[in-house]
Image: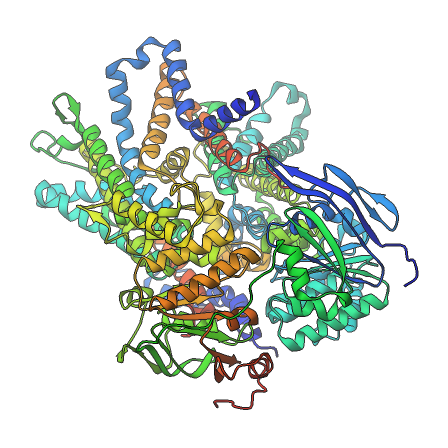
Amino acid sequence: MKPGTLSTFLKRGAIWGFIALELIFFTVAGEFLSVSDKAFMDVDNMLLLFKQSAPIGIIAMGMTIIMVNGNIDLSVGAIYAFCAVILLDSMTWPIFAGLGDAVIPVSWILALAVGTALGALNGLIVWKTGVDAFIVTLGSMLGYRGLVFMYNGEQPTSHLNWTLVDFAEQQFLGLHTATWFLLIVTAVIWFLMNRTVHGRNAYAIGDNRAAAVNAGIRVGPHMMVNFMIIGFLAALSAVVFYSESGSVNPNDGELYELWVITAVVLGGTKLTGGAGSIISTFGGVLAIQLLRKGLAHIGADTETVNLVIGLILIAVLFLDRQLNLKGKEELKV
Amino acid sequence: MTEQTPVLRLENIVKTFPGVRALDGVSFTVLPGEVHALMGENGAGKSTLMNVLGGIYQPDEGQIIVSEQPAVMTSPLEAKARGIMFIHQELSLAEELSVAENVYLGELPKKRFGLVDWDTLYARTDAILERLKVGFDARTRVGDLSIANQQMVEIARALTVDAKAVIFDEPTASLTDAEKVVLFEVIADLQRDGVGIIYISHRMEEIFKITDRISVLRDGSYRGTLHTRDTDEEAVTQLMIGRKLDLSRSESTHELGDVALEVRGLSCGHLFEDVSFHVRRGEVLGFYGLVGAGRTEIAETLFGLRDPSAGTILLDGQEIRIHSPVDAIERGISLVPEDRKGQGLVLGMNCRDNMTLPQVSDLTAGPFVSDGAEVAIFDQYRDKLDIRTPGWRQLVGNLSGGNQQKIVIGKWLSMHPNVLIVDEPTRGIDVGSKSEIHNLIRELAAQGYAVIVISSEMPEVLRVSDRIVAMYSGRVMRTFTSDDVTEDNLIQAISGLGDGAAA
Amino acid sequence: MSGLTKQNIGSFLARQGILVAFALFMIGFTLANGRFLDPDNVMGVVRSSAILGVMALGVTFVVISGNLDLSVGSMMSFSTIVVLDLHDKIGPTLAIPAMFALTLCLGALIGFLVGYLKLNSLIVTLGMLSAIHGLTLTWSGGKNMDIADKEATWFGIFGQGEIIGIPVPILIFALLASVLGLILAKTPFGRKVYAVGGNGTAATFSGIRRARVVFSCYLMSSFCVATAGLIQASRSMGSQNTVGQGLELEVLAAVILGGASLLGGSGTIFKTVIGVLILGFIQNGLLLVGLQFYVQYVVTWVIIILAVWLDIAAKRGKLWSPIA
């Protein structure tokens, strides 16, 4: 075994260890504190957990690519809301009136296309102007949210299509439709990042951008494609969630970017880019959802969730730094 | 020598930037199997020329001819496709990726649907690594390799294509002597295969060891090509700077004062162990050794940036403890650091603010910084050190390397230190400014400062020092006085072969 | 010669672009609606910008020192809720200093984490955003907080009062801006903030206690947040738990609009004030010409990107980025 392998292994596995810890804690604590009689590790409860992880989880996969690539996207919540509005509203458009239930795939494609386009716009601006992605997406977070409001004012946009609701509530092999989407997205993005040239180049760009440029990797198009992917995934997340709920408020998806980034960072993706794993991000998503459900299970108020997640995020950062310290010899800068 | 087809020919390359003629009709030729040195002071146009060759800049006039075919270089990829490979001075590796992915960065072998063909990738990379006789394989993570091995990965890149010409840009900067030997073997190998080599370096001894011809640039124009066999260092230097360089030692003519700083048995983990030395007022103590011998780390420890694990530091005979740069500065220890841009200067700040930074808290009128006091200090040291700048409002990022270094030196002189530590005082500074800085260091000693100079350049350390501490692998091997030092015994000492090893 | 002049105009536009844009906006809105430059209207805009502005002053310090603060919005909610709650329990005279003390503790905690433990400020303040929100909800039990007897207290003076005809929030904003502006531009501490943000390593090598400077910046930021919370609480005499939600990004937008670089080392208080006023006047101007508040979001988006783009285009001398 090479030196460093153990610590690498520890770091990679940390998120799963954390999840195990959460499960044990909430199971034991639930025995004493739980308001309900059901056990925490109940099968239905766990299936629900996966389903509820889906909206954040699907976007988190895209955020992992973006952050590995060395960027960040703060506009995902706004894209999510905008695509939800498009999805629900387009089903009532007169031009689609004759389609019957065939309007569903049309609306889906429309919403996904809009999400991809909004992502592409972010990517194009980052590429062509050279403005930092943090600022660009901070701006579009406001801008896209403005578009959501301009679409329908401050009114919610609603449309329930029962065929759609049935589809969304289906369970296949015991798992909900949303869970399937999350799993498929995770698998596809994992494949993209680990097996394709585009994925490996994304790592290279985030790790050492100058080297990637010198090696002839076209950084701009890569970044743009990645922003399109996260736009698409934000839209997909909206499609999955709103197919079932059927009503979107113009404020929906606010603070999603924070939850998503928290999940990705918990999963160990490097903030400076170049390193990160899709599987660990999946772990990060589960860990957050477990925490939310677990705290509710032991009767803690919702406000405690915010407090605990914030503190855990900081604790993870602190632990990561401690693990990377090189001992007392280190330069004090 | 029979007439050969040159692998690479540059004809009359002209490149202008707004207000500057960076390259002014540069021509030179690289033959197959030749090592051709490209020399010149910083700013002479070497890097502009390489950027033209690599397709980063387009020349305004002239042409590049590869194997007698005129070529238009539009990008680094284009250059690569034509068999022109660059090995950059600064490592350009992605540390989190494997060796193989780094070697084939930008052109990973593909299968259908844009999938990476890992088998081919690893097989090809391992074949190249075999040629380089390195002790790691294609799957190793680059971040786990030593700096020297990372350099080998960089070199492996040049072997991925049938290179016609390979450009080495200061390749030995971070290599140990043993690693240099391997590098020179690789270069000899390439030579035998008929590859033309362009070798850019400031190190004369290497140039004279491995090159066949030397071309010199000055102020963007071509100054001629010499056959290495028929020339010597002086002639090359003269061509580079247009005059003779005074490399003679300056004898100390002044009396030495008391011991200002003494160090006994100082250690810091494995970085350096059991280091003892002293320096007197009016004396320049040189530290010479290879990169990684622990010299910079000693300076950082004296400046409070590292905590020593053992040993004592005495200042004017009093034992002291230094926990931070603030402590060090209070006690009159100053450090001109190795990395001027990273550690010495805030490039986005103006000259005056950089110079007064350590004492800005003391330069106050009421609660505010006193403009007048600051400008007075700047003016004083600008005149004293002959800093050439349009005015104090100039951002230091816009100054030349030599003037930047003088700002850093001025910053510490204005604090009136007892001990001045200067780490690599002339790194990245052109030959002309170099001798100015050398003279300055001698003058400072004459004025009664105790000066410690750390350098990796033997001529420099010989020129400025009264005594020289030779270090190898974290230990002091021997301390030389100006009488008993020779180039030979100094090199032996820093290679760990010294006869008078202290340990 | 004409090319040179053109270049000069270009670089002037790029350097002072934000002022030029500001002037153009003012002219445009004035032409569109005569009431725009009415003193009452101007006063109203500045007054409603004061809360955002006061927070932006503190964040300017943090950003120049090379860090981010995403927690100011949630911290402002905390201050507001705490001071309203304590007002009825221990009276305004004690409630105000108590609230300041608690808010400064939060600032000190962040400063400790980012300055002394050297943790990444984006993630720390992201975590604190969430944690402080939880703290606020725990404090209030999730309920809205109201002062019971709004008539019987002098507490309203900070948000509703006027001195010589000028609303108190404006006076507070102006006073803080002047004091902090002087600190940043003229004192040794201000110089150190720029040095730490410009090149933290070089600052350490020059004997500057980097951790202490960063810590102080967060302390200042939390002081500004507490002040903003006081104005907010005093103005409305009651509040929801989420009153500051999302403000962190608007604040950051104002600071960036003022030309501070997220990399640290550049920016001024004066420019931040301009950034704040631009956001305020755009919002007001759009409302006056009959557009909804959310149109402002879209306009802000365009302006932020144009402002930063012009700024970096001037520095690199090219409009389009060199990214391949």
Up/down of B3 relative to C232, above or below: below
Left or right position of B408 against B141 = left
In the image shown, does A58 or B141 lie closer to the viewer? B141
Above or below, comparing residue A157 to residue A256 in the picture: above
In percent of width and height, residue C134 lies at: 31, 50
Q: Which image quadrant: the N terminus of chain C?
A: top right
The structure's colour scheme is rainbow
Question: Horizontal and vertical percent for residue A317?
Answer: 42, 60
Which image quadrant for residue C174? Answer: top left
Q: Nearer the viewer, residue B103 or A16?
A: B103
Q: Relative to residue B66, is residue C282 drawn left or right?
A: left
Count of numbered circles on the image: 0
Q: Is residue C210 left or right of residue B111?
A: left
Q: For this rendering, which residue is in front, B217 or C95?
A: B217
Q: Is residue B163 visible?
A: yes
Residue B323 location (% of width, % of height): 31, 70
- Residue drawn at x 30%, y 54% is C213
Q: Nearer the viewer, residue C220 or A111?
A: C220
Q: Is residue C123 left or right of residue B87?
A: left
Say if residue C125 shows up in the picture.
no
If the image is split into quadrants, where does the C terminus of chain C sit?
Answer: top right
Residue A283: percent from left, percent from top:
53, 59
Q: Which residue lies most toward the front here?
A: B253
